[in-house]
Structure formats: structure tokens, C-alpha cells
Image: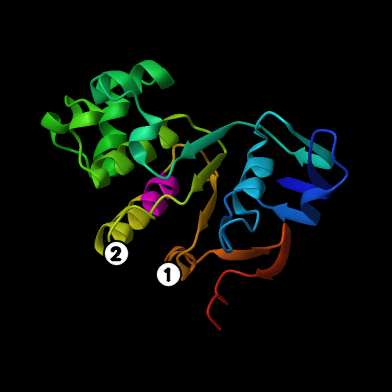
């Protein structure tokens, strides 16, 4: 469980809140989509949830995590999570400590079950393949939290839907007893509906709507 209470993010030396969260709870295994316009505070909220504020920012208030506070990250472009020149299978094993057999299993789970793809360098992958590889990396970390910041914004609708299905399916099939919680930021209203996720709408640095899963779009 992650709980934020009376949380404020401010630039160092400033009294103005860039983000304010009065109360937010995210349960283990929960799927949450964060929506809002550019500059609304989506990325800041993800940073607070992940416990990774950039230098120059300060969090006040309370951020509590029950259990392991480790985070897997799926970036906007999958290639940004990977070294572009180190062969994929070798890289995932070296970074996560996973055996080659487990890396192969997870790569197959995200649709990269061609041995030739596993031997390629990330720079040789398509955008959709790189995003799948980044998902595999997040799964292999065995983190209880997976944060994805605009992970489908660079993809066409068909690839977007494929990647979302892969993301949800790979996390649901995690080796852990409880699948990782998934928090995704997006401008795309289709994402929340596709993931059947709870939706947090952010505007002006505040959460202005909290829509339970199953009620998005109603």
C-alpha cells in the first residue's frame, strides 16, 4: 500500500506548491491511470508515487509505503530504458540478475520470442519492440510498483493497443503472489478504458477527479 497525506512538492526555496495531494492511497496490484493536460502535474505525481523527485524539488508531508519500496519504470520511449548497443538478452540478464532462461521466458511473455530479436541490440529494434523490451525489464526487476510515463504516446493506435495488452498481461503473470501495482500517465482517454483502471485526473497541480475502475467513461 502506498499512502500520500498532505503532500506538497515545492521548488527549493519557494513557498508555492507545484503539486498538492491531500490524500491518496494505491493498493497492491491496483491499476491507476493519471490523466491531465501538459503541465498539469502528471509527471510530478508519478515522481512522488515512485519516490524519485528530480534535484531542486522538495516533498513535504507524508509518503508511506507498506512493503518493499522498489520501482520498475517503463519510459515514453522503450529505448530510453536500455543501452542501445548491448545485446538485449545479455543486457536484461546483467541488469536484473535474472537467469538467461527467465529472461527468455519474460521476453516470450511480451511477444519477443524470436531468438534473433533477443540477440539484437536495442538500437536495431522497432519502436514497438523496444517498448516491449522495456516492459520485460520492468517485469524482471520484480518490483512491486511499475510506473509508466506516457508509454504509448509515440505509438500508432494498433501498436498502442498491443503494448497495453502486453503490459497488463505481463504484470498479471508476474512471479509474485500479488501482481505489481501499475501507474500510467497518459493524454489518451483510451488507455484508462483499455486497462480497466482507476483514473486520477490532474489539473493545476491537484487531483481533481478520482474515478474508480469500471466507471471510466460513464
Establish if 32 lies above or below 93. Answer: below
Tally of numbered discs: 2
Give percent across and percent down for residue 186: 49, 58
- Per the model, the C-alpha gap separating discs 2 and 1 is 10 Å
Q: Are marks 2 and 1 in contact (CB under 8 Å)?
A: yes
Q: Which mark is residue 190?
A: 1
Residue at 55%, 45% in the rendered image: 178
Establish if 86 lies above or below 134. Answer: above
Q: Is residue 195 left or right of residue 210?
A: left
Q: Quadrant of residue 162?
A: bottom left
Quarter containing the C terminus: bottom right
Magenta part, dominant SS? helix
Q: Is residue 87 left or right of residue 8?
A: left
Give percent across and percent down for residue 201: 63, 66
Among all residues in the image, which is located at the extreme bottom? 218
Residue at 18%, 38% in the rendered image: 113
Q: Nearer the viewer, residue 89 or 169?
A: 89
Establish if 68 lies above or below 208. Answer: above
Report if residue 169 lies within the magenta region: yes
Amino acid at each position: 500500500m502506498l499512502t500520500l497525506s498532505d503532500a506538497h512538492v515545492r521548488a527549493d526555496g519557494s513557498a508555492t506548491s507545484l503539486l498538492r495531494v491531500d490524500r491518496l492511497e494505491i493498493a497492491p496490484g491496483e491499476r491507476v491511470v493519471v490523466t491531465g493536460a501538459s503541465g498539469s502535474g502528471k509527471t510530478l505525481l508519478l515522481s512522488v508515487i515512485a519516490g524519485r523527485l528530480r534535484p531542486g524539488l522538495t516533498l513535504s508531508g507524508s509518503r508511506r509505503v507498506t512493503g518493499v519500496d522498489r520501482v520498475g519504470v517503463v519510459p515514453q520511449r522503450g529505448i530510453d530504458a536500455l543501452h542501445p548497443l548491448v545485446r538485449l538478452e545479455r543486457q536484461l540478464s546483467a541488469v536484473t540478475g535474472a537467469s538467461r532462461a527467465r529472461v527468455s521466458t519474460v521476453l516470450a511473455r511480451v511477444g519477443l520470442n524470436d531468438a534473433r530479436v533477443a540477440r539484437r541490440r536495442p538500437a536495431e529494434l522497432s519502436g514497438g519492440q523496444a517498448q516491449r523490451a522495456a516492459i520485460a525489464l520492468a517485469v524482471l526487476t520484480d518490483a512491486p510498483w511499475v510506473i509508466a510515463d506516457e508509454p504509448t504516446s509515440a505509438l500508432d493506435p494498433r501498436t498502442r493497443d498491443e503494448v497495453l495488452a502486453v503490459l497488463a498481461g505481463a504484470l498479471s503473470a508476474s512471479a509474485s503472489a500479488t501482481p505489481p501495482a501499475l501507474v500510467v500517465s497518459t493524454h489518451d482517454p483510451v488507455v484508462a478504458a483499455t486497462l480497466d483502471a482507476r483514473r486520477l485526473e490532474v489539473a493545476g497541480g491537484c487531483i481533481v477527479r478520482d474515478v474508480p475502475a469500471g466507471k471510466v467513461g460513464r
